Image (cartoon, rainbow, N blue to C red):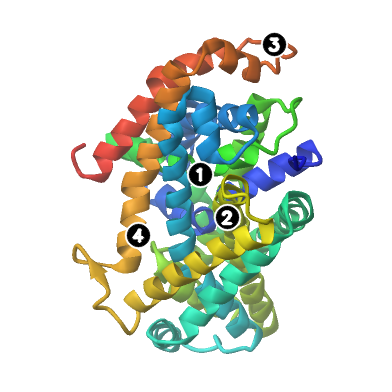
Amino acid sequence: MEKRSTFGSKLAIVLATAGSAVGLGNIWRFPFMTGQNGGAAFILVYFACVILLGIPGMVSEFIIGRRAQSNSAKAYGSIAGPRWRFIGYLGILTSTIILGFYAVVAGWCLQYLYASLAGQLNGDAAYVVGYFKSFSEDPVRPCLWAIAFVLITHFVVSRGVNEGIERASKLLMPLLLLLLVVLVVASCLLPGAGAGIEFLLKPDFSKVSTNVFLEALGQAFFSLSLGTACLCTYASYFKSDTNLLKSATQIALLDSAIAILAGLMIFPAAFSVGIQPDSGPSLIFITLPNVFQQAFGGMPVLGYIIGILFYALLVFAALTSTISMHEIGTAFFHEELKLPRQRATWILTIVCMVIAVFCSLSVGTCRGLQLFGMSLMDFCDFLTAQLMLPAGAFLTSIMTGWFVSQQVTHDEFTNGGVLKESFFKAWLFSVRYIVPLCILLIFLHQFGIL
């Protein structure tokens, strides 16, 4: 029997698993939501939500994955009985769909990195708007860039856990942090940057409402990759002496720190030139190129370098996420179908490339590719974010809280009694009551019921 790989060090565990959580959402969604929901007040609420929902949810998936030491479908079935395997299958399907449409936006980032290097983004606001419109509606280029991004991901995952995922995480995560710090410093040194820093970090408790709390819950939920089976899959490569609670806490803190640094990168620069950051693709591909152009207009070389660093940052952030999503399906095909890892990787790569091409075309030249009145890309986003992810995380919490032997969860939580059990009862109460309730509230809020 083939010996199963494990991450080589505790640092590799934190970097790889944090990398799965850190993505494009940290770079644009968190700063936008922070600015719209009370600045530092939202951040405080967000941290509370990470503690209430994020860390307990992460530990639940860690327990399942490490206990089973297998792909997510087999893991859920082995720890709670065959009837629970469907949660693992749901996670595999969810991550595959997400990887397919996520690769489209990641491909746009690759295109903009290339355009920055080639000096093609130097122009006025109208030019930048036209550039994005021309590129996104091109029938070929966005598809090719999306395929290229999936192939880059394939190259890393095909090399295995230690030579591929672990090595890439040790390279990409420090680079990502370094680039982010450089951009934060450059942004904060701009004239008038103090207003942006104040906007981000000064609490405005007058904006804190039930809606803000629910938005913070949703951000914590999606930012930490709950419900994708990613955490379960990565935990299956944890060593037996890994402190699950400590690892979850470190990963949550690193993920949150990167999100806050992204805010310190975006808000000071935007306020320096009098631009309010917007949400969605327009922030990354229209607003920020204009910000860089205006903020560093007097120093064109510096503006050129900042633009390159920013899009390199986005590419690295996207890649750390796509690697983890690819590994979920790869592990399943490799272990369940007994396929060589290379062949298993290619199966998922081809499936994701097909999804990526159709999603790209649906927001470009083939806008007739729709389901339920939405472009195929928007439908995939809606299906995974608003239905499949909450369902997977909700069922995982119910399963670990009520249907997995408490002796099993206690053993995994305490590493067989080696670690103190100080927080075990608090964790068990959380996954039984608090986490399901939070996810239910998020679900109802997304559909406008709350």
Q: Earlier in the sequence, mark 1 or mark 4?
A: 1
User: Rounded to the nearest whole Å, what is the CA distance between mark 4 and mark 3?
Assistant: 43 Å
Q: Earlier in the sequence, mark 3 or mark 2?
A: 2
The image's mark for residue 225 is 1
Find out whether the residues at labels 2 and 1 contact each other: C-beta distance under 8 Å. Answer: yes
User: Rounded to the nearest whole Å, what is the CA distance between mark 1 and mark 4?
Assistant: 16 Å
User: Rounded to the nearest whole Å, what is the CA distance between mark 3 and mark 2?
Assistant: 32 Å
> Residue 185 location, x and y as percent?
68, 60
Judge left or right: residue 227 versus residue 172: left
In the rendered image of this protein, does residue 388 appear above or below residue 123? above
User: Rounded to the nearest whole Å, what is the CA distance between mark 2 and mark 1?
Assistant: 9 Å
Which residue matches tag 4? 380
Question: Identity of the amino acid at label 3?
Answer: Lys
| Quadrant including the C terminus | top left
Q: Earlier in the sequence, mark 2 or mark 4?
A: 2
Give me the residue at 27% from left, 78% from top. 367
Query: Looking at this view, is 66 or 263 the one in front?
Result: 66
Q: Earlier in the sequence, mark 2 or mark 1?
A: 1
In the rendered image of this protein, does residue 266 appear above or below residue 388? below
Q: Earlier in the sequence, mark 3 or mark 1?
A: 1
